[in-house]
C-alpha cells in the first residue's frame, strides 16, 4: 500500500471516529471495562511496556470501530465503540495482544452493550446502561476473564454461555498461540501463507500453531457474536423508528 493510500485510510478512520463520537450521545454502543491481572507483580519497566501495548491496541480499536478510551488508576481501562457489534472482537483482540506480550500478561474485561453517553477523551465519566452493566460486570468478573451482558434476556441467553466457553479456551492459549491467532484474526488475507509472511514464520509452523489453538472455533464465535449484535442493533433502530412514527 502506498504512503498516500495509508494517509487516506488514516484520515477516513479519523473522520469516522469523530463522526461516531459526535453523534453517539443517545445511541447504542459497546463498552469494555477492564484491568490488567496481577499488575502489582510486574517490575516498573515491564509494566510500562504492558501499558504501551495496551494503549496501542486501544488506539487501534477506537479508530477502527469509531470510539474512544481511557486508561486510569494505573492498570484500569475503558473502551467505548460506536459499532457495538464489534465490541467482542475488540475485547478478544485486546486480550490476545496482551497474552502475546513477552511478560505473559492477561486482562479481565467486561463487555456490555446498550445506551451510552460520553464525551470524547472522558470515557471513564460516561453514563448509560452500557457503562453501568460493563462496570458492574467487572466488579463481579472473578474467576472469569471475559464476560458479556446486554441487559436483554433473549440476547444474553444466546451469548453469555458461549462467551464463558470462549473465555475458558483463551485462558489456555500460550504466548505464541495468542500472537499467531491475533495475526490471523487481523489479517485481510487469512490464508496460512499470508499469516506466516506477516509473522515471518514457516507456513507449516503457523498452520500447526493455529490448529493447536482451535482458531476456527474462535473465528466462528466472533462471527456469531457480530451477527447476534448486528441483529440487536437493527431491532433497536426499528423500535426507535416505530416509536417516532407513533409520536408523530
Image: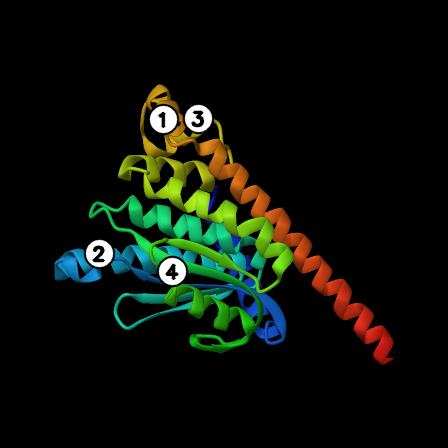
Q: Which mark is residue 206?
A: 1
Query: Is residue 103 in view from this perspective?
Result: yes
Q: How is the image coloured?
A: rainbow
Query: Between tags 3 and 4, which lies in front?
Result: 4
> Label 2 vs label 4: CA separation?
25 Å
Label 4: which secondary element: loop
Image spot of residue 140 (x, y percent): 39, 64
Distance Cα–Cα, label 3 vs label 4: 35 Å
* 3D distance between C-alphas at marks 2 and 3: 29 Å
The residue lying at 71 percent from left, 58 percent from top is 234
Above/below status of 216 relative to 6: above
Q: Is residue 201 left or right of residue 120?
A: left
Mark 2 = which residue? 49
Marks 1/3 in contact by CB < 8 Å: the verdict is yes
Which residue bears the numbered disc 4?
A: 141
Task: Give the image location of residue 202, x and y in percent.
Answer: 32, 22
Q: Nearer the viewer, mark 2 or mark 4?
A: 4
What is the secondary structure assignment of the residue under circle 1?
A: helix
Q: Could you tell which of marks 3 and 4 lies nearer the N-terminus?
A: 4
The number of callouts visible is 4
Of the two numbered discs 2 and 1 on the same chain, state the one appearing first in sequence: 2
SS label for mark 3:
helix
Q: Above or below — where is 178 with respect to 31? A: above
Q: Residue at x 51, y 56 (%)?
A: 87
Amino acid at each position: 500500500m502506498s504512503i498516500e493510500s495509508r494517509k487516506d485510510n488514516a484520515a477516513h478512520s479519523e473522520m469516522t471516529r469523530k463522526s461516531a463520537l459526535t453523534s453517539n450521545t443517545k445511541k447504542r454502543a459497546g463498552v469494555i471495562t477492564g484491568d490488567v491481572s496481577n499488575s502489582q507483580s510486574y517490575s516498573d519497566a515491564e509494566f510500562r511496556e504492558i501499558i504501551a501495548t495496551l494503549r496501542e491496541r486501544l488506539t487501534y480499536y477506537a479508530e477502527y470501530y469509531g470510539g474512544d478510551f481511557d486508561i486510569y488508576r494505573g492498570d484500569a481501562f475503558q473502551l467505548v465503540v460506536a459499532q457495538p457489534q464489534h465490541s467482542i472482537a475488540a475485547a478478544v483482540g485486546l486480550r490476545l495482544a496482551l497474552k502475546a506480550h513477552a511478560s505473559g500478561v492477561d486482562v479481565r474485561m467486561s463487555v456490555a452493550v446498550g445506551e451510552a453517553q460520553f464525551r470524547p477523551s472522558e470515557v471513564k465519566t460516561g453514563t448509560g446502561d452500557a457503562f453501568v452493566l460493563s462496570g458492574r460486570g467487572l466488579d463481579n468478573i472473578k474467576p472469569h476473564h471475559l464476560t458479556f451482558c446486554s441487559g436483554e434476556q433473549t440476547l444474553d441467553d444466546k451469548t453469555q454461555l458461549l462467551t464463558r466457553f470462549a473465555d475458558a479456551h483463551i485462558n489456555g492459549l500460550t504466548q505464541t498461540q495468542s500472537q499467531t491467532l491475533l495475526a490471523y484474526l487481523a489479517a485481510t488475507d487469512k490464508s496460512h501463507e499470508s499469516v506466516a509472511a506477516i509473522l515471518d514464520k514457516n507456513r507449516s509452523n503457523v498452520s500447526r500453531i493455529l490448529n493447536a489453538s482451535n482458531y476456527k472455533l474462535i473465528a466462528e464465535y466472533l462471527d456469531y457474536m457480530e451477527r447476534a449484535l448486528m441483529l440487536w442493533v437493527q431491532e433497536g433502530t426499528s423500535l426507535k423508528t416505530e416509536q417516532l412514527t407513533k409520536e408523530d
